[in-house]
Image: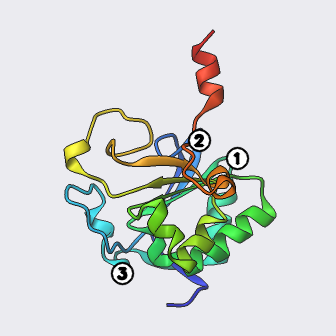
Amino acid sequence: MSNNVLYVADIIESTIVDGIGFRTSLYLSGCDICCEGCHNKKFWDIYSGHPMKIDEVFEKITVSFTNVTFIGGEPMLQAESLVVLAEKIKNNTNKDIWIYSGHTYEEILNNKLYLNLLKHCDVLVDGKYDEKFFQNNIRFKGSTNQRIIDINKSLEKNKVVLWSDEEDSLCYNH
C-alpha cells in the first residue's frame, strides 16, 4: 500500500457523535480486530472503501469549520498514510484530531508506526468494542470498557490521562 493513498469507507460531515463539537469523520476501511457486534462490519475489508489520494482527502475533510475524527474500520491499519494526512492537517489548519482504535493506548505505545500516528492526534478513544459493556447514550464510546484519552497529557506525564470536557462540566455547574 502506498503512503500517498488511503482506503476510505466514508466521510461524514458535521457529525456530533465522533468527538466533541462538530466534526468531519473519516471512516477508513480495513479492520484486523473485528469486534463482536461491530456496527461497521462492512468496513472490515480494506477494499470495501475506495482509494483516495491524501491531498484529495485533506481537501475534503478540512473544507469546513469542523474538527476531524479518524475512525473505521481500524485506523491503525493505515497508520503510515494517516501520519502524512495528520501532519498536513496540523501544519495547515488549527483543527484537532480524534482517533478511534480497537488497540489500547498501551498497545499503541509499543508499536512505532502507531505511536507516530498517535503523536499527531489529540484524543484517542481506545480499546475493543465489547457488547458486554454496551450502554445506550454513553458519550463518544460504544462500550464502557473503552477510554477517552488526552494524548498530549498522557505522553507528557508518561501515564494515561483521561480526556475531560472542562467547558461542558463548567456549563452544567451553573
Q: Find the residue positioned furthest to the front.
A: 158
**Dot 3 and dot 2 residues touching (CB under 8 Å):** no
Is 165 positioned to the left or the right of 48 in the image?
A: right
Circle on res. 65: 1
Q: CA distance from mark 3 to mark 2?
A: 28 Å
Viewport quadrant of the C terminus = top right
Circle on res. 22: 2
166 up-or-down from 150: above or below = above
Name the amino acid, label 2.
Phe
Of the image marks 3 and 1, the number of the one nearer the N terminus: 3
Is 11 positioned to the left or the right of 88 in the image?
A: left
Name the amino acid, label 1.
Phe
Q: Find the residue positioned furthest to the right.
A: 92
Is 90 positioned to the left or the right of 20 in the image?
A: right
Quadrant of the rendered image containing residue 56: bottom right
The image position of residue 161, as x and y in percent, is 57, 46
Circle on res. 47: 3
169 up-or-down from 37: above or below = above
Indicate the secondary structure of the residue bearing disc 1: loop
Please state which of residues 64 and 33 is positioned toward the viewer in this rendering.
33
Indicate the secondary structure of the residue bearing disc 2: loop
The answer to whether any part of residue 151 appears in the image is yes
Q: For the point 61% across and 85% down, which residue is it?
A: 4
Q: CA distance from mark 3 to mark 1?
A: 30 Å
The answer to whether any part of residue 52 appears in the image is no
**Dot 1 and dot 2 residues touching (CB under 8 Å):** yes
Q: Find the residue positioned furthest to the top.
A: 174
